[in-house]
Image: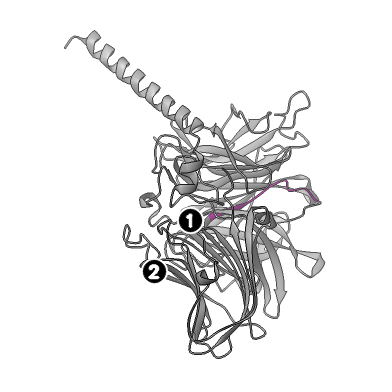
């Protein structure tokens, strides 16, 4: 074949692929789910964020700016499995009602856009601000697909995150390392500079840096190995959190993603509570020899916090990816794959044995509440009590309850109940365990690591237990005893499975209060 013909064919193929990919990007960016497909898709979450289509994993760049909560996220514009990692983008006025925007920072020149954070450079320390416009700056790990090197990079936006310019002198930090990723940056007021915490993943270490301008960085210290080290460390974050009941006291919470080796198997997160002096994080003694898990379910990973929350709000707000690397790429959802957990408000509480974490769904959830059911002093004898017979059923529910277990050995709820389907949320008094059993929750046999029972140690306090449960089309989140223990699990039942039951075994329980709301979808 003549050389010019080969060149012509190659050029045509390149043009076809280029147009196809860009067409796919445009399709991904402009794909609007209709009302019917959104609410009738059995696995489409109704009050959790999921992209219109294609693959997503870690939340990135969470920041509040100009009246909007920004959610950037690991996104593949070209397919429903991991690859071509770019930053997708969505905005919300309340962390509930999300609008997906075009891809923010795309893969380019053999560099994928891995996880990271976003900050608002109000004082223009970076010099990226122009004509009085305050820059939003993304700090992210770049992954070179040819060398496999991971390094830290910048991009900036002057139009509230709608368009982005990559810094011309990237990377700003490189160790020529293949496991150096997921920067989290915040302004450290006492020393008037920026702090970055970033993972040396295969070493089970975190490295702290400081910078005056986000461009030049100075190494401060390393943390780790400590706690769980059964898998690589990823997606670290460090937050200063108020201590509940002690208005003048704060502690620092360090969260680290672990994959695999989590308490429920696969990916998950551990946390440490301690102090940070601007250079070094020092965990409290109780955290040096024991692992403290963020979530005891299978599906809460890569949690990160919103930056730039107004002082008058003052909350520490987290968001995690609601999936597990053991099976995420095989999940039966369509046309999307991957979703976010519900946003959480984080608190530190001081107990007899030291400090611990409390997690609760953000109060903005109340805006989705629909029909309300209330019960007082409900007695449940051994066996099953159907709440569906009282008119209470649904595929999207919020449940708040206080239960006095008495002598019952096992009690709780069966949610998303249908023919041969149920997810069991219960408490075992003999084992002092909260649990979620999803072995019969719907479609379970698509991956060997999916079916199972997830458990969390939990003591009954003052002869009672409190549960706050969120039920969606494809997930349950269980917050027990004010969020002292949390279990997050994906489920894949039929849309017709909307029954709800209470059960007790080995004794009678008293449900002193029970409130149930049907929740409305966050978009029409």
Q: Main secondary structure of the magenta part?
A: loop
Name the spot of residue 314 as percent of width and height, x first.
Answer: 77, 54
Q: Earlier in the sequence, mark 2 or mark 1?
A: 2
Kindly give the residue lying farthest to the left in the view shown: 1
Q: Is residue 202 left or right of residue 480?
A: left
Q: Quadrant of the C terminus?
A: top right
Name the spot of residue 207 as percent of width and height, x first.
Answer: 59, 52
Name the spot of residue 475 as percent of width and height, x first.
Answer: 49, 59
Q: Which residue is mark 2?
A: 452
Q: Which residue is depicted at the point 58% across and 89% down? A: 406
Q: Which residue is depicted at the point 40% across and 37% down? A: 147
Kindly give the residue lying farthest to the right in the view shown: 248
Depth check, front residue: 373 or 241 = 373
Q: Which residue is mark 1?
A: 473
Q: Quadrant of the N terminus?
A: top left
Q: Are marks 2 and 1 in contact (CB under 8 Å)?
A: no
Q: In this orientation, does residue 404 appear?
A: no
Q: In this orientation, does residue 290 appear?
A: yes
Is-magenta flag for residue 303?
yes
Rendering quarter of residue 293: bottom right
Magenta region = 302-311
Is-magenta flag for residue 407?
no
How is this picture coloured? Answer: one colour
Helix, strand or loop at mark 2: loop
Query: Relative to 28, is 413 above or below?
Result: below
Helix, strand or loop at mark 1: loop
């Amino acid at each position: 074949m003549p050389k010019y013909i080969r060149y012509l064919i190659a050029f045509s193929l390149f043009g076809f692929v280029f147009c196809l990919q860009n067409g796919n990007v445009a399709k991904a960016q402009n794909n609007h789910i209709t009302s019917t497909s959104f609410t009738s898709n059995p696995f489409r979450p109704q009050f959790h964020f999921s992209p219109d289509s294609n693959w997503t994993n870690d939340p990135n760049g969470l920041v509040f700016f100009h009246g909007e909560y920004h959610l950037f996220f690991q996104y593949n514009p070209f397919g429903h499995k991991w690859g071509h990692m770019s930053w997708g983008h969505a905005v919300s006025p309340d962390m509930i009602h999300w609008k997906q925007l075009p891809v923010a920072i795309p893969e380019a020149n053999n560099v994928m856009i891995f996880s990271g954070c976003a900050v608002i450079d109000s004082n223009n320390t970076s010099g990226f601000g122009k004509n009085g416009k305050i820059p939003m700056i993304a700090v992210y790990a770049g992954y070179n697909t040819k060398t496999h090197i991971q390094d830290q990079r910048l991009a900036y936006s002057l139009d509230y995150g709608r368009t982005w310019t990559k810094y011309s002198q990237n990377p700003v930090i490189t160790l020529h390392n293949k496991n150096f990723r997921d920067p989290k940056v915040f302004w450290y007021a006492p020393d008037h500079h920026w702090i970055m915490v970033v993972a040396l993943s295969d070493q089970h270490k975190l490295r702290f840096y400081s910078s005056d301008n986000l461009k030049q960085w100075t190494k401060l210290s390393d943390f780790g190995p400590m706690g769980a080290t059964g898998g690589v460390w990823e997606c670290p974050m460090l937050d200063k959190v108020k201590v509940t009941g002690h208005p003048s006291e704060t502690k620092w919470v360090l969260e680290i993603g672990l994959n695999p080796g989590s308490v429920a198997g696969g990916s998950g997160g551990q946390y440490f509570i301690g102090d940070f002096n601007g250079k070094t994080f020092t965990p409290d003694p109780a955290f040096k020899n024991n692992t403290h898990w963020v979530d005891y379910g299978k599906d809460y990973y890569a949690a990160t916090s919103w930056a730039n929350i107004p002082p008058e709000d003052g909350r520490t707000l987290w968001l995690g990816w609601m999936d597990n690397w053991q099976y995420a790429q095989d999940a039966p959802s369509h046309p999307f794959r991957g979703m976010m957990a519900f946003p959480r408000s984080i608190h530190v509480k001081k107990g007899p044995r030291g400090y611990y974490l409390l997690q609760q769904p953000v109060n903005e959830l109340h805006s989705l509440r629909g029909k309300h059911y209330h019960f007082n002093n409900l007695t449940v004898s051994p066996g099953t009590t159907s709440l569906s017979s009282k008119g209470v059923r649904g595929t999207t529910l919020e449940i708040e309850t206080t239960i006095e277990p008495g002598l019952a050995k096992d009690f709780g709820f069966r949610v998303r109940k249908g023919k041969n389907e149920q997810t069991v949320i219960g408490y075992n008094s003999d084992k002092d365990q909260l649990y979620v059993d999803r072995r019969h929750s719907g479609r379970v046999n698509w991956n060997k690591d999916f079916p199972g029972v997830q458990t969390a140690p939990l003591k009954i306090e003052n002869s009672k237990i409190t549960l706050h449960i969120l039920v969606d089309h494809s997930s349950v989140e269980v917050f027990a005893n004010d969020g002292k223990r949390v279990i997050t699990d994906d489920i894949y039942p039929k849309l017709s499975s909307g029954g709800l039951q209470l059960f007790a075994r080995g004794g009678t329980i008293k449900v002193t209060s029970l409130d149930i709301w049907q929740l409305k979808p966050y978009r029409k």
